[in-house]
Amino acid sequence: MRTDVVERPVNGTSPTPGPQRPGPAGLTFAVLGPVRAWRHGRELALGSPQQVAVLSALLLYEGRPVQPEVLIDVVWDGEPPRAALGTVRTYLSRLRRVLGEGAQSGAIVAAGSGYALPLRPDALDLAGFRGEVAAGQSRLRAGDPAGAVDTLRRALGRWHGDALAGVPGRYAAAQRSRLGELRLAALESRLTAELAGPGPDAGLAEELSALVEQYPLREGFRELLMLSLYRSGRRADALRTYLDGDRRLRDEVGVEPGPALRRLQQRMLAGDPALLVEAAPPVPAPAPTAAVAVHLPADLPSFVGRTQELAQVTERLAARTPGTVGIVGLDGTGRSTLLIRAARMVTGRYPGGVLHADLAAADEREVLRNWLHQLTAGADGPAELPASACGLAALLRPVAAGRRMLVLADNVADGGQVARLRDALPEADLLFTAHRRVTGAPGAAWVRLGPLSSVDGLEMLRRLAGPDRIDAEVSAARRLVDLCSAYPTPLRLVAERLEARPDYPVAVLAAELAEELDSASVPAHDDCVVAEAPLHRAYQRLAPLQAGVLRCVAGAGLPEFTAPHVAALLDIPQHQAWTALDALVDVGLVEEFGPRGRYRMPYFVEAFTRRLTAEAHHPSEPARRLDQLAAHRSRAAVPAGNRGAAAPTEPAVPRRASHVATVREGSATAIERAWSSGGSDAA
């Protein structure tokens, strides 16, 4: 019996990770250790760590398209240089040369707006590992522990160190952690199968002791060790193992052992003779029942518009099997509402059922436990469920196998949650929402929500406040929509204020709202506080430079702007301005439009940011920067021989007023013309 923790090769095979069964053009890959590639058995040189990071992302997407922005995040952790896209394309070009050209060869190919590396599943060690783990667990449930041990040993023998060893970046670290959890779960299954075999084995207890020492808070290993010791006649050691775990859990985490571990201790204290003869397989996976019922939150009767976004969601869900689609946007733009509306449109595609959870309102383990109960309703399910998310996921996989299902996950916090849900339900389509695009969500397609169109915003007011009242003052109602930048939450609050004042003219309410938004000295109405809460949350997530860019642009009142404009305002390099603007677009505080990298800020966001700046007592950043910019342009206009001459005597404040007037009245072209003239008032 082996006593070390790391899996050894079986049957005397070499410990060197050899290539898997060849895929197209003889290409095979390994990610369960250092990232490696072979062509017809000959190892390939993959290039720099950054280039290997790009390849690792393509491999983990397993043939699904990877968008360029995802690859940029993989390499630069959300802080890319200005030329990031060009650099990524260079890495892809080099990898194509290394791997071989053309889709038929299995090399990197264009796939829509992204890139993919099409491979047969058996050409990647990760796919082979997953398949063998599933087969081993099936053998164990079928009462064949010896066959399960052999199969799970082969699966674990595919590992050669940490996954993605040596690959830099947060994405690789997150995937390394996720894959490491899969490895530990497979190891736990193999040890469970060994314990289910005949007779006690001292070597098994030694191996489990080493694992408990290495992973002291992992209750599955501790439970197996207790049972192994007990069946070997070492009852006192088994109970001491429990006490040690109890102490460590309370000291380090502040919780007591889970119910399974506590129950095992009680049975040992009572001398339960069944423990000496019971096999210890994992809890059998209950047989699937009929399709789970569709339980979705109520749809909103005031839902309007979003035709394009709904089409994108439904099309992207259908584009791949299984599909993963993320709906992202500022809080209050209707992400959850769109999630439910889209789900209701496609439920007919999913005879296996629809599962829904709000991850902001429930722990992941609670979500998985509830889903397992829904899928096994009426079946002879396990009397006791695992405490860990990993154990619950292992039960969900066989229950959901073969079902055509849709999983809805509202308010995902990060890519790790997406990866864990995908691991628990690998065959289901996954539709989720998040406040911004998350990294570490392999294969995800993205649908971004901004404000409603002006037409849809007006229709929303008509539905909420009544069509007669809105149609009677349609111009004032349009002004309300514009003041709210057609965001659903402020429009809903405006409609509620109209309902509370049935005799109040719409025009008067529009004038009040305009005054509240435009003046930092006027105390915000309670409705404004509620409407601006999503903006507060988004602002609090910003890095200092991103927040500074937002305040500066809002204070300057620019109707349109570019990265060079922002760079000049803040006196920073253009690549830093571009990176900050890209982040602001990602969280929904700034919109990008047109083919030339133009940006604009919705008026509602601008008004909020001005008030926030005033409340926080920030100095007048835009005014100061506009003065500096004007002075810089004026100096640049002075001939080289006259640089020592006196600067123009025009005072700074009129110069700043000229700039602000220009940018408020004109287009981005007018901005450029004013700035290039050094801020002079001459037309």
Image (cartoon, rainbow, N blue to C red):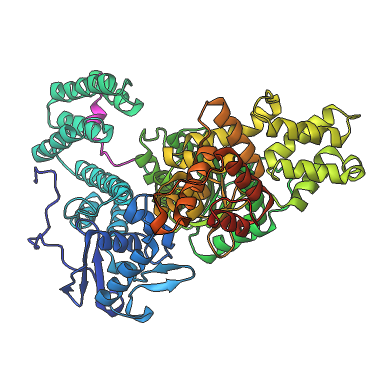
* In front of the other: 516 or 477: 516
Start-end of magenta stretch: 270-283
Judge from the rendering whether residue 457 lies leftward or rightward of residue 621; answer left or right: right
User: In the rendered structure, does residue 441 fall within the stretch colored magenta?
Assistant: no
> Looking at the picture, does residue 654 appear above or below residue 26?
above
What count of labels does the image hold? 0
Whether residue 586 is visible to the viewer of this picture, yes or no, is yes
* In front of the other: 185 or 580: 580
Query: In which image quadrant can residue 130 be found?
Result: bottom left
Residue 102: where, in percent of width, then height?
A: 36, 80
Whether residue 350 is visible to the viewer of this picture, yes or no, is no
Residue at the spot 74% in from the left edge and 31% down from the top edge: 515
User: In the rendered structure, does residue 279 fall within the stretch colored magenta?
Assistant: yes
Judge from the rendering whether residue 359 lies leftward or rightward of residue 665; answer left or right: left
Residue at the spot 64% in from the left edge and 61% down from the top edge: 311
* In front of the other: 266 or 558: 558
* In front of the other: 135 or 180: 180
> Looking at the picture, does residue 616 appear above or below residue 201?
above
Residue 372: where, in percent of width, then height?
A: 47, 41
> Looking at the picture, does residue 380 appear above or below residue 216?
below
Q: Quadrant of the C terminus?
A: bottom right
Residue at the spot 33% in from the left edge and 75% down from the top edge: 107
Q: What is the magenta segment's predominant secondary structure?
A: loop
Residue 483: where, in percent of width, then height?
A: 72, 41
Residue 540: where, in percent of width, then height?
A: 49, 33
